[in-house]
Amino acid sequence: MVRYSNIYIASLVFFVFAFVQVNAQDITLELGRSDIGINEEFTITLTVRNDRLRKYGDFPDISGFEKAGTSSSSSTNIINGQVSSTQSVTQTYLPTRQGTFKLQAFQMNVNDKPVNSRGATITVGPERSQSAGRNSPNNPFFDDPFDNFFGKRNESQEFVDVKEDAFLALTTTKDEVYTGEGFTTTLAFYVAENNEAPLQFYDLGKQLTGILKAIKPSNCWEENFNIENISGRPVTINRKNYTQYKIYQATYYPFNQDAIQFPSISLDMIKYKIAKNPSFFGRNRKEEFKKFYSQPKVVKVKDLPPHPLKEAVAVGNYRLNEKLDNRELKTGESFDYTFSVEGEGNISAIEKPMIKQNDNFDIYAPGVRQNINRRNNRVTGSKAFSYYAVPKEPGDYNLGNYFQWIYFNPEQKKYDTLASEITVHVTGKSKKNESIQASDMGSFYDRIEFSDNRLQELGTDKTLQLIANILILSVLLLSAVIVFKK
């Protein structure tokens, strides 16, 4: 017992001095043991001291190893009024075969700062007994001192599998939609409030590549919510409390009547077995993999009701917001008018209003400004068309006769029209004749009426024609002489 205590104290002193040596560094990368057995793990630990670990890049891939998830830890110390904190993330690697493997020098971006590591050469040997070497019961760092204190035997740890209360689900906000009508699809992982099985996401970035390929339908326009940070939020399902972790979310707008079919999606998670007899210093959980599956889902698509413009209209719930700088106008003086369509739907697919040609206004092609918001399972926004126009005739005009936009409202199941409700008063002289003059083709066309319309032969210069013929004949003769000489 005394011998164990001396080793334990000496080791603590060693770690204290080691901590003092590296305490000056804010961000460090620490590599695990380079000589391991096929049944052991290699680790890379990223540590940030006296700062918060806000974000970090991907840990490197190692040939001959597979990533087996990450674990994190944090601590805060207050000594003589001085506060220091430490946050660590450890990436675990499992060897796939025996041999010698090279971890090349690599760089990671941590909190927007580059951190370098020189790499290492890792040797993977035969399977090692858990009671040998570093895992020996004579090593105080892998022994429970309280077990020794109470005289318990040092025996191998037994782990038990705890049944998880969690599931993966792909859900949609609607089971049936019209062509062009949006519905939001969410892939999320749900963990019950009373779940006792420790779970952790595994290499989610790589898994998402395959997941997105399987989810995205080919006959839909997608508005992706771009989930960057997976954080839990409480939800209630069938009167039971869960924590929802959204993995992917997007709103889809079908182009045709083909049904939208979502297959069953799989997600690999890290699940831990719990130690049957947990100890203070010992290993209290064992990492394993668990695959979760979502149920397949089908969303039916139905055709829009008959209408001359049904192939071109937008589908959604919209309203009109219009703006005019002045309702008292003068002929020949320009004005600005904004026709803004706002609401919920496929904002990107909104086309400009069809303006009728008329003699009362010159209306020019609009400038377009678009704004899209993706939040709370909905896609909303606006698309504004800013027109520049010039009145040509005096009078009172209802702009609703010139600016109209037709769409289909899926909630009311009918077509509707957004039309301007603004009336303008135009004063001044008629500018129609000035428009005609402005389009005058010029004096060339003015002389057409007085020109002779009889056909005349184009004049030619006989002298130039004779010289040209002589030159052509000379070239032909010279070519013939050269050919015969050869």
Image (spheres, rainbow, N blue to C red):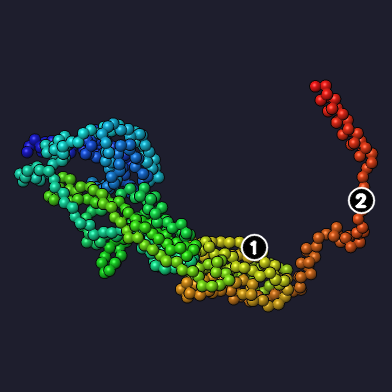
Nearest the viewer among 230 and 328 is 230
Quadrant into which the C terminus falls = top right
Residue 115 position, x and y percent, is: 36, 39
Question: For this rendering, which residue is in front, 350 or 467?
Answer: 467
> Residue drawn 81% across and 25% down?
483
Please indicate whether residue 90 sits to the left or right of residue 8 in the image: right
What is the quadrant of residue 191 in the picture?
A: bottom left
User: Whole-Å distance between the Cαs marked 1 and 2?
Assistant: 47 Å
Reading the image, the residue beneath label 1 is 365
- Work out whether residue 304 can be spotted: yes
Image disc number at residue 210: none
Quarter where residue 337 is shown: bottom right
Q: Which is nearer the eye, 434 or 10?
A: 434
Comes first in the chain, label 1 or label 2: 1
Please, is residue 70 above or below residue 177 in the view? above
Q: Position of residue 447 (x, y in %)?
A: 88, 60
* Residue located farthest toward the front when viewing the structure as drawn: 484
* Discs 1/2, front: 2
Q: Position of residue 93 (x, y in %)?
A: 28, 41
Position above or below: 340 against 74: below
Give the residue drawn at x 72%, y 71%: 359
Q: Is residue 421 left or right of residue 67?
A: right
Quarter of the figure with residue 244: bottom left
Residue receiving disc 2: 457
Query: Is residue 377 visible to us here?
Result: no
Vertical placement of 78 versus 345: above or below? above
Q: Residue furthest top?
A: 485
